Amino acid sequence: MRTTMKRRIGGDDDDGGSRGEAAIGFGPRVGPLSPRHRYQAVRGRTLRTAGKVIAWLVIVAAMAAGGLAGGVFLFLDDSVQALRPTAPDVIAAKPELVGIPDASAPTTALVIGFDERLGVDQDVVARADTVMLLRADPNNDTITLLSFPRDLRVEHPGCATKASWVGRLNEAYVHCRASGTLRSVKQLTGLEINYLITANFRAFRKLVDKVGGVWIDVDQRYFNDRGGPGGYATINLQPGYQRLTGKQALDYARYRHTDNDVFRTLRQQLFVKSFKQQVEAEVDPIGLPGLVKTLVENVEIQQGGRRDIDRDTILRYARFVYELPSGAFHQVRLGSDSFTEDAGGALLASSETLGRALNEFRRPDADAPTKAADVATGKKPETPKAASTTISLLNGNGEDGAAADAAQRLRERGYQAVSAGDADHFNYFDTLVRYRTSDAQGKAAAEAVALLFDGRTEEAPEDAVFDTMIQVVVGATYHRSIAPGARDQTPERQEINVVNRTDDILPLLHAAQGQVSMPILVPLVRQSDSILFPERPLRVYKIKDQDGVKRDAVKIVFRRGDLRYWGIMQTRMTDAPILRGASTKRTIKGREYSLYFSGPRLTMVAFTQNKTVYWVTNTLDQHFSNETMLAIAQGLQPLRGA
């Protein structure tokens, strides 16, 4: 694999991942994805490493405004003025951005998080360690986030002060500032970008504290008490669901003692989701001015086209985010098993890997949680998956290659489509999708495909000959495009990977039962390769809820391998913020489960009984299958003899 990009990946008109075997580099050196037990504490790093969350802090604060009364309009007028760029490099980026054609069009923003601090020669050094893309799609009711590790090796197009060169992604900001970083990302991805958001990291702690902290289910024991220049960064967090202060959240988001940059990114994404929940729950008109003031003092927004960012634009996106349905926030994740490491310490991923990530970023499947839940619970979906839908296409308009072109576009969406020649005549006006009445799923598949062509469906005549699920006759209304939409992300059903074991956990749970008033459940099964976390397998404690009332809580921590942790939470805090916004619900053997997805990946399973809430959390990188997660949750049963 090569270590630089020789061409852009995943342009707007392609599906990504089909342009050869170029490689890209990700992240700082962390060994061959092995634990790093020590890292250097650098002045200012506390602010810098938290920056990957700044993007969503901007959107979430706007969302809070969108959910409040109209009295915030006058306040927002002044605030929006302050968001307009004053930095020369952000102003200079405007020609590189693309204007928005209309209010309903999908838009993409590039977010650059920077840190300005003194270098060794007492000069101010500006570094951009956060480069991420945000995409809002009103047509699909989704918001998608894709983060690029700072040490991604790319080809930089250069700027007035430096010719093109090959180097790490964050070098673009050092040499060419924001406008240069924008050009580098555009060349890497081939995407059109509508907004540029730059954020100074000074706001991080203040924002968290202004919203009253952030609730996070901490997956393991994080501890180190050796601090100071040149030493370890300090941290002291217990496992379990808890409210973190700004400092604690920062410690959590920047931690990298015993894992690597991939897992640090995942912790930061978890923080972003939790911060959004906190703003939705507790920001009110009284607290909004201070929150927005902190933002506007540290954020600038440049907009493509002739106009500058205005109040109406901010409020439009605020309302869009505020009204998003559950599960509409998609975080594109690249797990640690997606990478290899080159001799220089960079993490490499093939262009195919990046292409898939960009395709998911551009076309998130809004129905992925529901479809994934159907697969995991054994429910046969009404509409078959694209991958299992076979289609033969006929040319019904007489234009050369029309059927072949349509077949290619369907294949890019995941369908099994082939061009089968000409129809019986070339006078078809609408595109026609035929199905057999004998095929139970054929009609649903035909209706889904007809929507892509703005066509119509009909039962296939008795003399129709085709050996696929459906047949498409391409009509005159087909103009070499199909409706925009998501690539089907419905997962294949996987085997349940659990073992029965309780000998090590039972003594701990029996002892814990005497310390709490709630009924403790015992996990009868666990993921087959997991062990109880040796350092802190069980924590019995009190959670102080939003009203200051202390609630019983028990956290069980398991470890799978050296880097992955997952757990089971049990508490009387039945209104915990983490429980808001379940993607879908399913009832299995009389117990109703709330399922929380990120795209097609199940992140958490929760249920309530006997005035107690219980939930199972996946590893940070969602390593366990949906089926395994459900099996663990179903295996939670009363503790006998308690």
Image: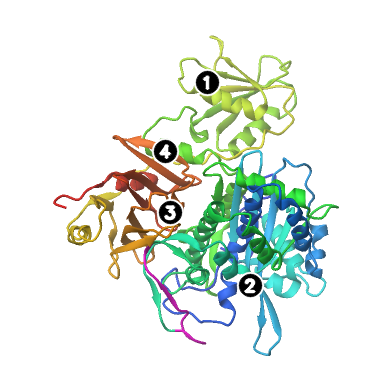
Look at the magenta stretch and give its main secondary structure. loop
User: Mark 3 highlights which residue?
Assistant: 622
Q: Is residue 149 above or below residue 381?
A: below
Q: Residues within 10 Å of mark 2 (few under 14, many from 20)?
A: many
The first of marks 2 and 1 along the sequence is: 2
Q: Is residue 234 magenta?
A: yes
Q: Is residue 68 visible?
A: yes
- Contact (Cβ within 8 Å) of mark 4 with mark 1: no
The first of marks 1 and 3 along the sequence is: 1
Q: Nearer the viewer, residue 549 or 66?
A: 549
**Left/right of residue 338 with respect to residue 521 in the rendered view:** right
Tell me the residue at 71%/50% (across/down). Answer: 71
Give the numbered dot on residue 202.
2
User: Mark 4 highlights which residue?
Assistant: 585
Residue at the far left: name it.
Answer: 641
**Left/right of residue 536 with respect to residue 102 in the rendered view:** left
The boundaries of the magenta stretch are 227-240
Instruction: Give the image quarter of residue 415.
Output: top right
Alpha carbon of mark 2 to alpha carbon of mark 3: how far?
A: 31 Å
The first of marks 2 and 3 along the sequence is: 2
Alpha carbon of mark 1 to alpha carbon of mark 3: how far?
A: 34 Å
Position in image of residue 338 (x %, y %): 49, 58
